[in-house]
């Protein structure tokens, strides 16, 4: 290939979890639309091996699955790091020569900060994508800094919850791994993992965050005072935002198979705004008692509902519930979530508040019933209910269970009455702001353009040296 035809080539490396693959895929598509060559590596034995391209993005798969609990999390993470570190140099060399476009940048999930070492060894640009909210990043960053200074956990928790750049947080609003940090909790390796995202925060060449300026102005400005960060979100398919990228209607590689049979027809048959969509994402596992309360709460609300219950969770549903509620309710093992949220019949989203789900509902103007489970979800729920005011948050009883009465009450609050109207107005406002951020010349679009231009400039400068 002629030297002048060669393009700067980005290798995107998400961790093998749906909530991380999705934003990295979208970022890759956006970069590919800005005259960069982009390849994404998917670690999975499940994702179709014949997926070689997603539009303009090249896909390679490496057999290494997400965490399934067969070994300890620490051991899994060690194996993952060892595998990636071993395979990356060969992959970079192979892709550079097979495509004719030399890899010039490793774009990695912030949960694998150690990729920066490989980037340095290979003389490549190292760029990290943070896939959670900037508020949550700010919490973890501060914990990282305070741990370095040996500040004791109790003091640290109070300082973080009162941090001026964040909404006033109760302990229960903090990410779950942080809430438990005073004790030797089961979460300690996860806490190390999330805090470890900041181990070389100041050294990476670029830091991207899947959020947008107006959504988290205070947190973005504060974190940007520590080092340059670039908000580039919301990273959801263009069809649901600016409609500028052709054929960009779905994320792409899915670790789950949607069962869509009858789903669209069912939604089509319902009245506008009448359906409650319920999903707890790809990882959260609820207890049997909690599942039953949700089931009866949905029934009591009298609303139609579409409920995603993953195959592994299905046994927790009350006996005969699916059969008894058929007609009014549809239970599926996995959905095309964006298509569902965009459907006119969906009036509210009962969600675990995973960051992608939150951004999706926000970008599509769908009001939420926030039912956080763990990790960053409590903090996202706090912002949904109290800062952006695009939903209500359920309250658990003294046993930690959200009762059927509470489920019913929250659904009614969001769907009916004056509070519901106010929430809908706020949801529309945020929907427009999300679109503005990614549309041409918007704050997120500008950051992506700047990165692409800078990579191209550096690449051509070095090629012609
Ligand atoms: N998702 C989907 N179908 C489902 C449930 C979830 O496509 O039935 C997608 C959803 O659109 C989102 C991702 O899976 O992009 C889940 O990410 P999130 O951060 O919301 O939650 P996590 O699964 O990481 O807890």
Image (cartoon, grey):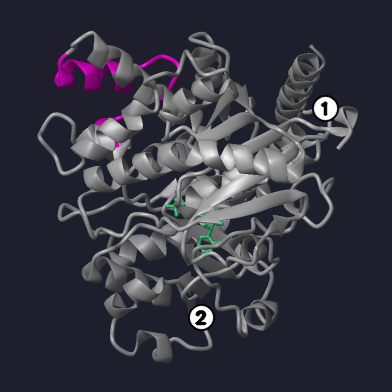
Q: Please tell me whether residue 224 belongs to the stretch shown in magenta.
A: no
Tell me if 430 is positioned left or right of 209 in this view.
right
Disc 2 crowd rating (10 Å Cα; few below 14, some 14-19, many 20+) is: some
- Residue 187's place in the image compared with 126, above or below, is below
Q: Position of residue 367 (x, y in %)?
A: 57, 52
Q: Residue furthest left?
A: 184
Q: Position of residue 357 (x, y in %)?
A: 53, 51
Q: Is residue 414 visible?
A: yes
Q: How far separated are the C-alphas under marks 1 and 2?
A: 41 Å
- Residue 128's place in the image compared with 303, above or below, is above
Q: Please tell me whether residue 170 belongs to the stretch shown in magenta.
A: yes
Residue at which label 2 appears: 330
What residue lies at 47% left-to-right and 36% top-to-bottom? Answer: 383
Instruction: State yes or no: discs 1 and 2 in contact (Cβ < 8 Å).
Output: no
- 139 or 159: nearer the viewer: 139
Please report the bounds of the magenta region as a residue range: 152-172
Q: Is mark 1 within 8 Å of ligand 1?
A: no
Residue at which label 1 appears: 441
Tell me the SS state at disc 2. Answer: strand
- 180 or 300: nearer the viewer: 180
What residue lies at 45% left-to-right and 49% top-to-bottom? Answer: 353
Quadrant in the picture for the C terminus: top right
Q: Quadrant of residue 319?
A: bottom left
Tell me the SS state at disc 1. Answer: loop
């Amino acid at each position: 290939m002629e030297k002048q035809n060669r393009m700067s080539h980005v290798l995107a490396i998400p961790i093998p979890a749906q909530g991380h693959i999705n934003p990295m895929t979208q970022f890759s598509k956006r970069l590919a639309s800005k005259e960069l060559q982009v390849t994404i590596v998917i670690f999975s034995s499940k994702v179709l091996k014949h997926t070689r391209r997603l539009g303009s993005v090249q896909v390679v798969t490496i057999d290494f699955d997400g965490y399934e609990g067969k070994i300890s999390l620490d051991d899994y993470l060690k194996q993952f790091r060892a595998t990636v570190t071993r395979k990356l140099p060969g992959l970079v060399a192979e892709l550079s020569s097979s495509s004719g476009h030399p890899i010039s940048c490793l774009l990695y999930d912030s949960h694998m900060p150690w990729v920066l070492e490989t980037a340095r060894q290979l003389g490549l640009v190292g760029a990290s994508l943070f896939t959670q909210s900037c508020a949550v990043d700010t919490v973890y960053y501060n914990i990282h800094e305070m741990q370095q200074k040996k500040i004791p956990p109790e003091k640290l928790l109070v300082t973080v919850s009162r941090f001026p750049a964040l909404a006033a947080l109760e302990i229960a609003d903090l990410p779950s791994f942080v809430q438990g940090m005073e004790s030797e909790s089961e979460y300690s390796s996860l806490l190390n993992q999330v805090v470890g995202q900041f181990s070389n925060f100041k050294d990476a060449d670029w830091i991207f965050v899947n959020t947008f300026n107006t959504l988290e102005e205070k947190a973005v400005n504060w974190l940007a005072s520590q080092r340059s960060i670039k908000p580039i979100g919301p990273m959801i398919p263009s069809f649901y935002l600016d409609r500028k990228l052709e054929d960009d209607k779905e994320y792409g590689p899915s670790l789950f198979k949607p069962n869509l049979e009858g789903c669209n027809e069912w939604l089509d048959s319902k009245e506008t705004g009448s359906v409650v969509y319920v999903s707890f994402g790809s990882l959260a596992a609820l207890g049997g008692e909690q599942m039953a309360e949700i089931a009866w709460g949905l029934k009591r609300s009298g609303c139609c509902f579409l409920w995603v219950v993953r195959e592994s969770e299905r046994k927790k549903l009350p006996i005969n519930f699916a059969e008894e509620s058929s007609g009014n309710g549809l239970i599926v093992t996995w959905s095309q979530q964006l298509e569902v949220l965009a459907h006119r019949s969906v009036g509210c989203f009962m969600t675990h508040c995973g960051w992608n789900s939150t951004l999706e509902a926000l970008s599509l103007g769908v009001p939420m019933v926030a039912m956080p489970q763990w990790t960053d979800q409590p903090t996202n729920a706090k912002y949904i209910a109290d800062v952006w005011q695009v939903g209500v948050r359920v309250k658990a009883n003294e046993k930690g269970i959200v009762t059927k009465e509470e489920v019913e009450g929250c659904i009614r609050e969001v769907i009916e009455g004056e509070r519901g109207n106010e929430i809908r107005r706020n949801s529309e406002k945020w929907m427009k702001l999300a679109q503005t951020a990614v549309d041409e010349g918007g704050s997120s679009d500008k950051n992506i353009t700047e990165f692409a231009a800078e990579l191209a400039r550096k690449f051509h400068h070095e090629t012609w040296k």
